[in-house]
Image (cartoon, rainbow, N blue to C red):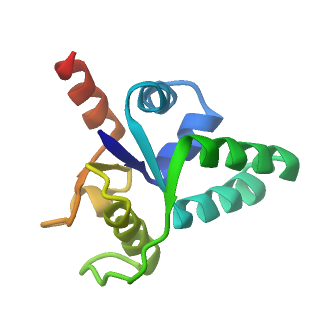
Amino acid sequence: MKVCLDTNVVVSAVATRGLCGDLFQAILAEHELVLGATVLGELRTVLSRKMRVPRDTIHELEAHLRGHATVVKAVAKRRITGLDAADAAVVAEAVAGRADVLVSGDQHLLKLADPPVEIVSPRGLWEAFRRAT
């Protein structure tokens, strides 16, 4: 399964222990990780400005992610009613990466009517993985 992660899920996976970290490990072990260029940019910003992670550590993390993921940038921007430009870019990159699912904790994305890609919460994907085994 091709799984695209939103910024909030990646930050939670690398900065804390818990569901997102476990989900991230399961994706790396058994699925194909897709990350958008938008997510990587937002990740750098959050880690440096909000969490004060050293620049070298951020570069190492990004190199690790790039080494284990397909990184995509949407060629064309999609206008999606109800989403700001950053959220629309994340969805567009998930579509460009041909992800089967986009994982996000963002309620704007989770409540999106008729999304162009399936969008689920981290808990929702974790439960789907558990049902599949």
Q: Is residue 120 above or below residue 80?
A: above
Quarter of the rendering occupied by the N terminus: top left
Q: Position of residue 101 (x, y in %)?
A: 28, 49
> Which quadrant of the figure has residue 46?
bottom right
Q: Position of residue 2 (x, y in %)?
A: 33, 44
Q: Is residue 51 above or below residue 83?
A: above
Question: Total of numbered circles in the picture?
Answer: 0
Residue at 60%, 59% (x, y): give it.
40
In-image side of 62 versus 31 (left or right): right
Q: Is residue 68 above or below residue 112?
A: above
Q: Residue at the far top: name it.
A: 133
Q: Along the line of sight, which residue is nearer the eye, 115 or 106?
A: 115
Q: Position of residue 126 (x, y in %)?
A: 31, 28
Q: Position of residue 34 (x, y in %)?
A: 44, 50
Residue at 54%, 67% (x, y): give it.
38
Q: Is residue 51 above or below residue 20?
A: below
In-image side of 49 versus 78 (left or right): right
Quarter of the rendering occupied by the C terminus: top left
Residue at 47%, 24% (x, y): give it.
22
Q: Residue at the far left: name it.
A: 114
> Which quadrant of the figure has residue 121?
top left
In-image side of 115 versus 104 (left or right): left
